[in-house]
Amino acid sequence: MANKLIPGVNDLETLYPEVASQWDHEKNGNLKPSMLLPGSGKRVWWKCICGNEWNTAVYHRTAGHKCGVCASREAMTHKGINDLATVKPELAAQFDKEKNSPFTASDFTLYSQAKVWWTCHEGHSWKTTVSHRASGEKCPYCAGNKILPGYNDIVTLRYAFVDEWDYEKNGDILPEEVGPGTVRKVWWKCKKEGHSWEAAVYSRTAGSNCPYCAQNVVVIGVNDLETTHAEILHEWDIEKNEGLKPHMVARTAAKPVWWKCPKGHSYDASPGFRDRGYGCPYCADRRVLKGFNDFESRHPELMDSWDREKNHISPDSITSGCSSEKVWWKDRLGHSWQATPANRVNGTDCPYCAGRQILKGFNDLQSVYPKVAAEWNHEKNKGLKPDMVVYGSQRKVWWRCGRGHEWRALVNDRAVDGTGCPYCHNKKVLPGFNDFASWHSELADEWHKTRNGSKKPSDYVYGSHKYAWWTCPLGHDYQRTIADRHDGYGCPYCSNVKVLAGFNDLATKTPWLAKEWDPERNRRRTPQEVFPSSNLKVWWRCEGGHHWRASISGRQSGSRCPYCYGLVPRKAHYIT
């Protein structure tokens, strides 16, 4: 009874599932591991996870005999030293423990040829050798090397193209089986006109569309050159096109054909190029034609400055409109420089003569303006010297005058415009040198304490035309420019330049005259608004009621009412 097979109780698959997992179902045909006892002497086929296939008796396997290849590998694998888990832990993290059981990442070296299961960070599962993964092989689905429906097929990634998939002509090939980068050619059917064409999948995803709609395929009477561009057919070069006719090419074709412009120039250009509006390249200066549009023929006046020694090209080999390549030029002074022909045509001359580039001994500051260069501040300019800048430079540098003043200014301003030290010329204030406080300390007490804000007398040069507030010794507040104070002008009230009611006005100085002021006839003017010495003629009214006009200074000198003193004959109509 001990040797009787009872499936599910004492068969190989039940008692030795690990051994049964290596059963080669393909080569063993209908024979199953559940149909043999563990001690059976029958020789069967086995297939290891490493890919090795061999034939041996069942009892050899249950007695402990393993795959010869793996046994040799295990002898070379030293866990904790050269196994996959130790050497490449980041790779071991993708080792599929469930599908590879009972094997682990510690059972393989990096050079193992065993095919095992892997799971990437996206959850994709695939099988490949350990050595391939160690050499850098990535997930074939993430890399686009294999198609996984729902992940990297064109239905998922480029659904718009599925509408033009020709299911009839593609037969068993489905869009779910190809990716955006597939190089395989398949059939397409455009939605607009129903045109059918063959093209690689990657070319569609790269932007190509129906070649018939795009005019890339000739449809006579629709998109051929003769039909669409009759206006340029007279330029078709019949001789050079050797039998090719305009109706045989599409208007957007990329292959060049021959043309002859109205001026007789022969050139090659694609119909697509002509379709975009381009014509003869010689007339448009895109190609050079000696004697017609070459630089030498068009601009003989510039040939004297063409540097034939340094230039490795001839002026008749470039167009007059050439702007991309710089060539050498040499002027009458012997200056050599580079510039594009187009720049020269537009008026660009020698950069040294124009001061755009420096040439020591010719246009540098030291050579042209040595006196200005003498005030160069070598310390603050840190290695920059006056012979290193052109005299017309717009660069700001440091200067030091003979008095030791330091300032920054444009080189051009100093040399060309003649500006000097801003402190010596009173353009800028330098406390202790040209400020108002240093020059007129005796007037510092007259600087208004509050009405000038935070400004002080030392903030202005003594010749400044800035208005400031002042307080004279008598307490009068007034405005004058700082230059006025420097020139000796003081309080306008004390000097009787301005009237100050209660101080120097008529009413205050000569109250007896103010009593005869005629307020009615003088309208808005009052005796508090005029000087006693003013030559202004105003109206007066004496105690007798007489009205007359006389200057204020005249009254101050003693003139009285002309009527009361008999200077004017009395008449009955005089007002009394």
Image (cartoon, rainbow, N blue to C red):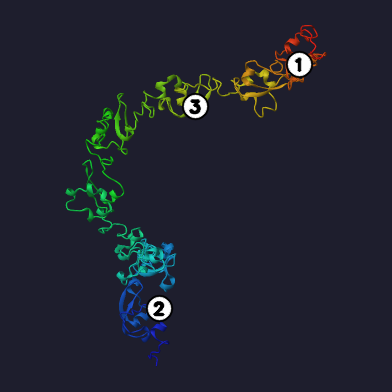
Camera-near label (1 vs 3) is 1
Q: Quadrant of the N terminus?
A: bottom left
Label 1 and label 3: CA atoms lie apart by 55 Å
Q: Residue at x 65, y 24 (%)?
A: 468
Q: Earlier in the sequence, mark 2 or mark 1?
A: 2
Identify which residue, 485 or 389, lies in the foreground: 485
Q: Position of residue 530 (x, y in %)?
A: 73, 17
Residue at 39% of width from left, 91% of height from top? Answer: 2
Numbered label attached to residue 409: 3
Q: As drawn, is 421 to the left or to the right of 524? A: left
Q: Amino acid at mark 3?
A: Ala
On the image, numbered disc 1 is attached to which residue? 506
Q: Residue at x 20, y 48 (%)?
A: 237
State how far apart marks 3 and 2 are (Cα): 91 Å
Q: Nearer the viewer, residue 396 or 475?
A: 475
Which residue does the numbered mark 2 point to in the structure image?
A: 18
| Residues under numbered marks 2 and 1 in contact, where contact means CB atoms less than 8 Å apart | no
- Residue type for callout 1: Leu
